[in-house]
Amino acid sequence: MSTAERFVRRALLTPPQLRLLLAAGFVFVVFKSLRAALTEQAGLLTSPAASAVVAGVLCAVLPLCRRMPVPVAAVTGAGFLLESQVWPVFLALYGVTLWRPRGTAIALTGAVFVPAAFGPFRELVGMPQVVLFPCAILAVPLAVGLAVRSQRDLAGSLARQLEHLEAANRLRDEQVRMAERARIAREMHDVLAHRLSLLVLHTGVLQRRGDTVPEPVRERLDLLRTTSAHALDDLRDLLGALRDHEGPVPLAPTADDLPALIAESERAGTRVRARTDDLAGLPAAVRLAAHRIVQEALTNARRHAPGTPVDLTVTVTRTRVAIRAENECGAAPERRDGPSRGYGLVGTAERVAALHGELTTGRTGDGRFVLTADLPVSVHPVEEPSALSAAAAR
């Protein structure tokens, strides 16, 4: 039994409650059957003691109804036709309806009903309690069993649909994470390939100055150039398969891209109250992550709360970059197939986690949506490619 199906069933009745209910029902059936055998003159046996023994045997086979519902129904059906024991056959036919095909349940009910509906047979065995309504009495376990079975099938169907929905949501989340990881890998591939290419280029420039470079240094430079070239080839072979057919991914955003992103959002109708520090000098991965986080925050504000201003703060220190975006929560439009669900924040969280940072999102008590991100920055200064190129040209 699946987890969702167990949850649905436990929500209706817990196992201890079910066992207690079954025990109470069994005691009730035993009491009613023995009482009828001792007090009512019905059936072929005229001795109350013999009728009580038959009633006890019929009640004793009822616990086997779960494993052998058809034989138990046949035995209790015979007891009903010959000794007018109604309660055991009720439970047996109910069990057959629950645990065996509907056709089998209908056939057994008919096999018990047809003789009981035949007047001469009732007079032969003495069935005073079913003279007026034999059909109604024997149809009760069949009708109740079919209703309970339909409810059980419906609960199982809903449970399976819930499991499929949960599996689909997990698959979507995983696809978003994998797509974001692949995107990060492609972007970092471009950044690292660019820097390794500069390293190979500058090492070759120093090698060509053979008259000013000592021989041991020239040998080290040759080893450095060869190793860098091999590392560049290995990096391209390892991550090149992650590229798509849409063309190369651009390098990490520059310091001017963040103001351009804010200006683009304002042209789209979102007023941004921004207080941002300069991202120049940060590692490429941190610059790229900050750019994507701000882009996702402005996109979500424009999509879910159009026309409301966004308070954006980007604080840069030597050890970290703190990003905070806050705006009023808009009423998301409802869809017929359920509430809309975005996956941009899933990819953003994956990007932040890859840099060992922290991302928090949620609504505040005053009805505003807040996104905060904290990205660690390496304590070592990172030189820009332009600076490396200028140093190698000297």
Image (cartoon, rainbow, N blue to C red):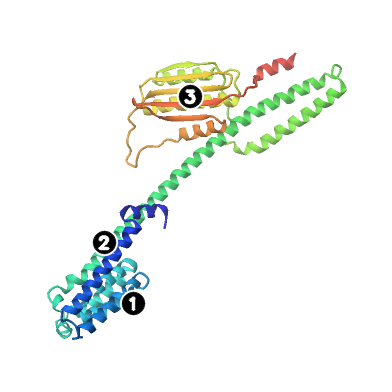
Q: Which mark is residue 147?
A: 2
Count of numbered badges drawn on the protein: 3
Q: Quadrant of residue 251?
A: top right
Left or right, 326 with respect to 256, comes to left
- The secondary structure type at the circle numbered 3 is helix
Few, some or many residues within 10 Å of mark 1 (<14, 14–19, 20+): some
- The secondary structure type at the circle numbered 1 is helix
Q: Earlier in the sequence, mark 3 or mark 2?
A: 2
- Mark 3 sits on what residue? 294
Q: Position of residue 202 (x, y in %)?
A: 74, 21
Q: Earlier in the sequence, mark 1 or mark 3?
A: 1
**Which sits in the foreground, 157 or 86?**
86
Question: Are the two marked residues, 1 and 3, in contact with CB atoms closer than 8 angstroms?
Answer: no
- Mark 1 sits on what residue? 71
Q: Position of residue 29 (x, y in %)?
A: 24, 70
Q: Is residue 204 above or below residue 344?
A: above
The quarter of the image holding the C terminus is top right
Rendered residue at 19%/79% (across/down): 38
Q: Earlier in the sequence, mark 2 or mark 1?
A: 1
Few, some or many residues within 10 Å of mark 3 (<14, 14–19, 20+): many
